[in-house]
Image (cartoon, helix red, strand yellow):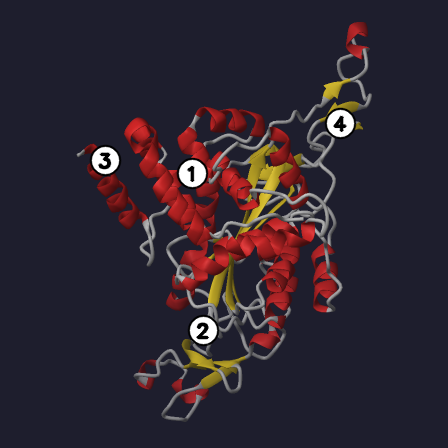
Amino acid sequence: MLGNWRKHGEYQTWLKSKLISLMPEHEAQIRYYGSIVEKVYVLNLDPLKEVIVPLYSSIGRPAQNQPELFRALVVMVHCKTQDPTKFVNLLRASPVLSAICGFERQTPGVGTFYDLLARLWLADAPQKEIKTPKSKGRKRPKSGDKLKPKHPGIVKKLVDKALQGRLIEKRPERILQRILKECAVIPSSKLGLLGNPDNLAVSGDGSPLLTGASPYGKRLCKCHTQGIYRCKCKRSFTDPAANWGWDSYHEQWFYGHTLYSITSADSPNDLPMFLRLVQGSRHDNVTFVFSWVELLNLYPEFKFSKALLDSAHDVYDIYRLLWANQTEPFIDLNGRNKGHSIYSGPLTVNAFGVPICMANLPMRNWGFNNNGYRIKWRCPHYKDKSQCPKQQECSPSSYGRVVYTKPNWDLRLFTPTPRDSKAWKGIYARRTTVERTFKRIKLRMPDVEVKSGGFGKQLWRQSISTWMRKLRY
């Protein structure tokens, strides 16, 4: 069961007084850890209690310092270490770092951290696995191409299940997803850092994440002593979930996982809303189906109006999935899918879904009609019909010929915002927000300074400088 839970306001008051008491002797350390102090001071962990209460028994010895332990994990990542043993030694050697985490007396042991991590991951800890090593076994894709899915038609099967409400996957990281939501995404939304929650645009993509484990495993046999170096004997793998994937940007194979992120695209802060780790060989369109369903279940309070995706998601079934949620797709066309349109109506259209008139000219987009849910197109010479070579054959109306296209004719071709238009390109340009999310996660960029209310960075720096002056003089 959970013990005493110190609220965030109480922690803030205690931290200020504690750092003041440490200021004369440890001023250099406080300045050195200034950036992490700014982070944890505004990180409200009060919503965390409701999330983790079901993970503890209602009887027994109360668990102490749970918000402090979770805050210590944030500090540990900031200190660029993932080893609880090293971090515990660092805490015990630095009273400033221990105070930042919120530990008043004795710092916890290594086992306490591992116990918390085991509770947050709803599955058994990954173990070594003994199996036969596998090679890439697949043909190298062409320059700029993505790796094709292993099973053709798998996206259609998954989307059909998702639309029937039967695609439910209980991932072991679902508690971590809720923590991300309650402690980061929802507070950011209240501060206006994500955009309008009733009209939210998101961007999704995957990025290679290499593992430190060997793709060849550790030999358990003694074949090499007999001169056999390429045996097919089973080996020990420390990361059994990793496998070979294709990095289309660098055009090379990688061994590891794929990090998939869905990021808010309406603000310049590039803040992720959903993170998922899958095998390196899994195609992005397969991962998107699972991620989209989980995203909708995780955030019922948000309305996702636009989805910005790259050409790896250019599959008709992805459009069906977005259409069911009334989410407008902004997906780049995949060059390999040219000529695979399902539209077979009387209109002649180009590759971007723009109708072609009798004079073989693309017609002018005249906006989207919400009542009829259709797109209006006008004659390209509507300003001066005398310039049209087909004036007599086209339409006698002074307004010029008008045609309509409906998205449900071909969800991929007739998008509500026409492809190749300035509006479409302007919205799709925000897709790169997910790329910057990956850059921050992988390279551990400095925190983005966000102007917000409350005790922010600037106020914190002014306050800490004031305390130092008072203590010095």
- Tell me: 44 left or right of 244: left
Around disc 4, counting alpha carbons within 10 Å, would you say few (fewer than 14), some (14 to 19), or many (20 or more)? some
Around disc 3, counting alpha carbons within 10 Å, would you say few (fewer than 14), some (14 to 19), or many (20 or more)? few
Q: Earlier in the sequence, mark 3 or mark 4?
A: 4
| Discs 3, 1 touching: Cβ within 8 Å | no
Nearest to the observer: residue 204 or residue 17: 17
Q: Give the spatial CA distance, label 3 vs label 4.
A: 63 Å
Q: Earlier in the sequence, mark 2 or mark 4?
A: 4
- Residue at image point 36% right, 34% down: 33
In the rendered image, which residue does mark 2 sit on?
A: 360
Q: Amino acid at mark 4?
A: Pro
Q: Amino acid at mark 1?
A: Ile
Nearest to the observer: residue 276 or residue 404: 276
Residue 134 can be seen, yes or no:
yes
- Residue at image point 59% right, 52% down: 177
In the rendered image, which residue does mark 3 sit on?
A: 471
The circle on residue 100 is 1
Q: Earlier in the sequence, mark 1 or mark 4?
A: 1
Q: Residue furthest bottom?
A: 397
Q: Horizontal and vertical percent for residue 211?
A: 60, 31
Q: Earlier in the sequence, mark 3 or mark 1?
A: 1
